[in-house]
Amino acid sequence: MMTIDIITVVPDLLDGPFSHSIMKRAQDKGLLMVRTHNLRKWAINKHAQVDDYPFGGGAGMVLMCEPLANAIEELQQSTVYDAIIYMTPDGKTFDQPMANQLSMQQNLLIICGHYKGIDQRIRDQFVTMEISIGDYVLSGGELAAAVVVDAIGRLIPGVLSDETSALTDSFQDNLLAPPVYTRPADFRGMKVPAILLQGDPKKVEDWRFEQSIERTKTRRPDLFKED
Ligand code: ADE
């Protein structure tokens, strides 16, 4: 069972993403446990304060050291984390190899920033990995954490009913996935490629591979340049 703990100031944002479909099934099957922790539980005063103005001035608030350190240390008392991840636009850009690697870990702790981020000393002292989901800024790390947990969760062995289906995803071999079709074979005069209807698995496989290469060449030529 993989455990993912998430520290956030907006736990409600994470109620939805893991309660449906494949993420729900992963948890129902006992393969994944996602727990969200409200940072305000570790607030420094009765006003539930967890953030403060930045030293040196400037716009926005910063999540304070004390609540975060106390939250992390309390969670560490019952769980040894393989990685403590901070979601941030200045982190390493998330990709399929990172998802693959993280899906092999046992216990992860994810910290979601909000406002202007978290005090640098928490990053220096506790965080072992910083992840961005792309070159754009979200209002908090929660949606980014949901993306990462989803990408990891579906890779845990046994989560997808057909275990090979993650292997044929786009990016697993630096190729985009081929087009897919289902019934009807003729929709408003638009026909499904004949090869898919002929029942020759070898021909289908070759066709899909060609289509993958073609798609990758036209849509993502950069993927060909890698490794
Ligand atoms: N928090 C705000 N923007 C983010 C991004 N692009 N990736 C990860 N966390 C973020």
Image: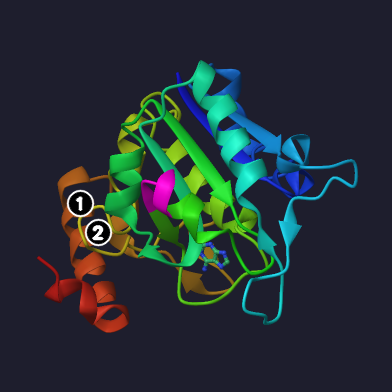
Kind of residue at badge 1: Glu
- Judge whether 196 appears above or below 189 on screen: above
Kind of residue at badge 2: Arg
| 124 left or right, relative to 5 | left
Q: Is mark 1 within 8 Å of ligand 1?
A: no
Viewport quadrant of the N terminus = top left
| 130 left or right, relative to 101 | right
Q: Which residue is mark 2?
A: 208
Residue 72's image quarter? top right
Whole-percent x, y for residue 222 in the image: 22, 79
**Residue 19 visible to the viewer:** no
Q: Is mark 2 within 8 Å of ligand 1?
A: no
Viewport quadrant of the C terminus = bottom left
Q: Which residue is mark 1?
A: 205
Which of the labelled discs sits on residue 125, or is there none? none
**Residue 9 visible to the viewer:** yes
**Residue closest to the eye, 131 or 61:** 61
Residue 170's image quarter? bottom left
Tell me if residue 79 is in the magenta stretch: no
Q: Which residues are magenta?
A: 124-129
Whole-percent x, y for residue 97 in the image: 27, 51
Whole-percent x, y for residue 51 in the image: 73, 57
| Residues at marks 2 and 1 touching, judged by CB atoms closer than 8 Å | yes
Task: Write down which quadrant ligand 1 falls in.
Answer: bottom right
